[in-house]
C-alpha cells in the first residue's frame, strides 16, 4: 500500500468513526437534557426585532415561525402538556412577520382557545389574534367566522358571536351560512342543531385535512351529547311513569318504542348504570363529548381521531 | 465613441462570464435545487397549509441571497484579481480603455447572475408545480419578483465594482455587504428621517436616498400571497435600478480612470 493510499484509508476510517461517535454522543446529550425547559423558551420575543432581522425576507421568516408554532403545539399536545406558554408569542411573531398568513389565524385560534388538553385554554389571546387578522385582512369573511366560533364554543358569548357572524356575512363573497349562523346564534345559541350546523359548515368549507378531522370529531361528540341527553330524559320519564328506574337499556328502549337498543356513532350500545345514568361504552373514542362520561373520567392517552367514512 | 467599443466590452463581458463559470459559480444551483426540493417535500409534513407559501418564499429568498453572495464575492475580485495576476496590464496595453474594462466586467458578472437566476427560476416553478399540481394565472407575478431580484443584482454588481475599484477585496466585501443590509432597511431609514428634526433630518433623508433601496425591489411576500403588482411599480423600479446602477458604475469608472496602476 502506498503512503497516499494509506492516508486515504486512515482518514476515511477516522471520518466514519468520528461521525458515528458524534451522533451517538449527541443522542446521549439529548437524553439528559431537560427537553420541556428547552422547548418552552422563546429567546427573541419581539416581533419588531425579528422582522427587522429578517432583512426584508419576512415572508420566509413567517413560514419558519409558523412551522415552529405547529411543531411546538403538536409536540406539547402529543405529550399531554397542560401549558403552552410560548404559543401566543409565537403566533404574534408569525402574524407580525406576515399579516396575510391566514393559516396562522385559522389554526392559531383553534390551538389557543380550547381548554387543555385540546388547546392552550387562552381564548382571550385567540380573540386578540383574530382581531389582528381581521384588521389586516378586512375583506376575509372566514376570519370573522373563526372569531365568532371562538365566542360561541369557548366563551359561550352568543350575543357577541351573533354580532361577529352578522358582520362577516356583510362582506363580499361571504358564504351564505354566515347569515344563518348569525340568526341561529341570536335565537337558539345553546342547542344541538346550532352546534351541528356550525361544525358541519366547518367540515364542508375547509379543504384542510386537520380541520376536517377536528370538525368530524366534534360532530360525533354532538351526536353522543344529544343521544345521551334524550336518553336521560327518557329515563326520567320512565321513572315518573313507573316509580322506578329501568332495569336495562333494553327495557328503556321497549318503553320508549325505540327500534332497538340505542347505540353511539360507532355502533356501541349506550350503557345504563344502576343509578339510572346513561353512559357511553368507550369514552376515549369521543374526545370532545361532554355528556355520558363515567364519573371521574379522565382521558387515558392521545385522543383517537376518526377519518370521514 | 469608436464603433469597436461594443465588441470590446462584449469580449471582456464574455471572458468574465466564462471565468465565473470556470470558477464553478453555477455549482450553487445544485445546493439550491436540493434546498428547494427538500423544502417542497418536507414542509408539507411538518407544517400546516403553507406548502405553496414556503416554496415561493424560500425559492425567491434563496435566489436573492445566493445571487447577492455571488455578486459580492465575484464583484469584489473582478478588478483586484486582474491586478494581482497582472493580466490587467495586458488588457489595457491593447486598445481597451479603462472604462470599457469596468463596463465589460459589469456586464459579464450581470450576465452570470441572469443565467443563474434563470435556472433557479425554473427550479422555483418546478417546485411550485410539485406542491400545487398546477399553475394559477397569479403565479406569473413570480416572474416579476425574479425580474426585481435581477434589478437588485445589477445594483449590487455595480456597487461591488465601485468598491473594488479603489479598495482591497476584503474591505470591498464588507462595504458591499453593509450597503446591502442598510439598503434592506431603507424604508426604516426614511421613517427615521421623517421623525427627526433640523440637521439630523437632512442628514437622515440624504442617507436614505443615497443608499440603495432594496426594500422597494423586494416583492416576495406580495407574490407569495398572489397579490397583483402594478405596471407602474415595474416601470419605476426598472428606472430606479438603472439609474442607481449607472450612478455606481460611473463612480467606479471615475475612480478607476484616476487610479495609479503602477
Image (cartoon, rainbow, N blue to C red):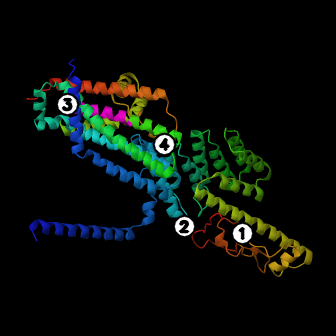
Give the residues in magenta.
B149-167
Expressed as whole percent of the image width and height from the top left, the position of residue B184 reads 37, 36
Are labels 2 and 3 on one chain?
no
| A272 relative position to A214: left or right | right
Q: Residue at point 70% right, 39% down?
A: A170
In the image, which is nearer the foreground, mark 1 or mark 2?
1
Expressed as whole percent of the image width and height from the top left, the position of residue A20 reads 29, 70
Looking at the image, is mark 4 or mark 3 earlier in the sequence? 3
Name the one closer to the observer, A125 or B32: B32
Name the residue beneath numbered marker 1. Answer: A265
> Gap in Å between the C-alphas at discs 2 and 3?
62 Å
User: Which disc number belongs to residue B224?
Assistant: 4
Badge 3: chain ID: B
Expressed as whole percent of the image width and height from the top left, the position of residue A8 reads 16, 66
Q: Residue at point 76% right, 53% down?
A: A189
> Gap in Å between the C-alphas at discs 1 and 2?
26 Å
In the image, which is nearer the foreground, mark 4 or mark 2?
4
In the image, which is nearer the foreground, mark 2 or mark 3?
3
- The answer to whether marks 4 and 1 mark residues whose Cβ atoms lie closer than 8 Å is no
**SS label for mark 3:** loop
> Gap in Å between the C-alphas at discs 3 and 1?
78 Å
> Gap in Å between the C-alphas at discs 4 and 2?
35 Å
Are labels 4 and 2 on one chain?
no
| A13 relative position to B64: left or right | left
Quarter holding residue B88 = top left
Badge 2: chain ID: A
Name the residue beneath numbered marker 2. Answer: A80
User: Which disc number belongs to residue B165?
Assistant: 3
**Residue A53 visible in the current orientation:** no
**SS label for mark 1:** loop
The quadrant of the picture occupied by the C terminus of chain B is top left
Amino acid at each position: 500500500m502506498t503512503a497516499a493510499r494509506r492516508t486515504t484509508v486512515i482518514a476515511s476510517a477516522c471520518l466514519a468513526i468520528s461521525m458515528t461517535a458524534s451522533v451517538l454522543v449527541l443522542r446521549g446529550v439529548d437524553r439528559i437534557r431537560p427537553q420541556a425547559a428547552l422547548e418552552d423558551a422563546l429567546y427573541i420575543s419581539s416581533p419588531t426585532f425579528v422582522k427587522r432581522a429578517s432583512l426584508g425576507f419576512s415572508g420566509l421568516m413567517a413560514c419558519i415561525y409558523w412551522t415552529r408554532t405547529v411543531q411546538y403545539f403538536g409536540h406539547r399536545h402529543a405529550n399531554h402538556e397542560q401549558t403552552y406558554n410560548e404559543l401566543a408569542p409565537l403566533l404574534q411573531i408569525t402574524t407580525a412577520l406576515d399579516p396575510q398568513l391566514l393559516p396562522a389565524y385559522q389554526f392559531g385560534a383553534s390551538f389557543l382557545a380550547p381548554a387543555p388538553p385540546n388547546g392552550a385554554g387562552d381564548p382571550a389571546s385567540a380573540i386578540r389574534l383574530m382581531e389582528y387578522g381581521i384588521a389586516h385582512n378586512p375583506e376575509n369573511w372566514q376570519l370573522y367566522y373563526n372569531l365568532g366560533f371562538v365566542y360561541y364554543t369557548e366563551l359561550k358569548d352568543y350575543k357577541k358571536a351573533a354580532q361577529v357572524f352578522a358582520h362577516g356575512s356583510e362582506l363580499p363573497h361571504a358564504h351564505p351560512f354566515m347569515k344563518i349562523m348569525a340568526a341561529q346564534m341570536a335565537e337558539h345559541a345553546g342547542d344541538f342543531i346550532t352546534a351541528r350546523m356550525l361544525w358541519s359548515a366547518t367540515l364542508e368549507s375547509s379543504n384542510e385535512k386537520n380541520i376536517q378531522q377536528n370538525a368530524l370529531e366534534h360532530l360525533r361528540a354532538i351526536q353522543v351529547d344529544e343521544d345521551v341527553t334524550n336518553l336521560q330524559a327518557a329515563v326520567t320519564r320512565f321513572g315518573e311513569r313507573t316509580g322506578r328506574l329501568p332495569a336495562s337499556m333494553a327495557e328503556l328502549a321497549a318503553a320508549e318504542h325505540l327500534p332497538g337498543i340505542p347505540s353511539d356513532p360507532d355502533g356501541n350500545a349506550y350503557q345504563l348504570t344502576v343509578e339510572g345514568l346513561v353512559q357511553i361504552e368507550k369514552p376515549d373514542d369521543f374526545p370532545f363529548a361532554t355528556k355520558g362520561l363515567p364519573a371521574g373520567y379522565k382521558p387515558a392517552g392521545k385522543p383517537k381521531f376518526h377519518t370521514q367514512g | 465613441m469608436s464603433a469597436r467599443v461594443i465588441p470590446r466590452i462584449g469580449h471582456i463581458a464574455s471572458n468574465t462570464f466564462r471565468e465565473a463559470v470556470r470558477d464553478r459559480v453555477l455549482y450553487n444551483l445544485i445546493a439550491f435545487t436540493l434546498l428547494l426540493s427538500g423544502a417542497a417535500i418536507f414542509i408539507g409534513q411538518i407544517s400546516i397549509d403553507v406548502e405553496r407559501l414556503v416554496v415561493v418564499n424560500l425559492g425567491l429568498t434563496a435566489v436573492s441571497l445566493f445571487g447577492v453572495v455571488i455578486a459580492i464575492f465575484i464583484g469584489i475580485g473582478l478588478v483586484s484579481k486582474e491586478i494581482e495576476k497582472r493580466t490587467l496590464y495586458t488588457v489595457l496595453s491593447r486598445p481597451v480603455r479603462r472604462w470599457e474594462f469596468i463596463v465589460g466586467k459589469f456586464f459579464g458578472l450581470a450576465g452570470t447572475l441572469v443565467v443563474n437566476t434563470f435556472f433557479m427560476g425554473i427550479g422555483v416553478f418546478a417546485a411550485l408545480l410539485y406542491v400545487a399540481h398546477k399553475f394559477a394565472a397569479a403565479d406569473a407575478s413570480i416572474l416579476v419578483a425574479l425580474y426585481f431580484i435581477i434589478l437588485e443584482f445589477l445594483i449590487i454588481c455595480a456597487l461591488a465594482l465601485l468598491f473594488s475599484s479603489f479598495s482591497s477585496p476584503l474591505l470591498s466585501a464588507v462595504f458591499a455587504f453593509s450597503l446591502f443590509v442598510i439598503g434592506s432597511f431603507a424604508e426604516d431609514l426614511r421613517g427615521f428621517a421623517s421623525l427627526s428634526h433640523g440637521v439630523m433630518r437632512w442628514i437622515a433623508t440624504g442617507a436614505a436616498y443615497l443608499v440603495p433601496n432594496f426594500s422597494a425591489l423586494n416583492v416576495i411576500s406580495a407574490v407569495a400571497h398572489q397579490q397583483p403588482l402594478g405596471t407602474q411599480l415595474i416601470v419605476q423600479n426598472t428606472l430606479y435600478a438603472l439609474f442607481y446602477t449607472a450612478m455606481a458604475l460611473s463612480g467606479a469608472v471615475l475612480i478607476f480612470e484616476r487610479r495609479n496602476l503602477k
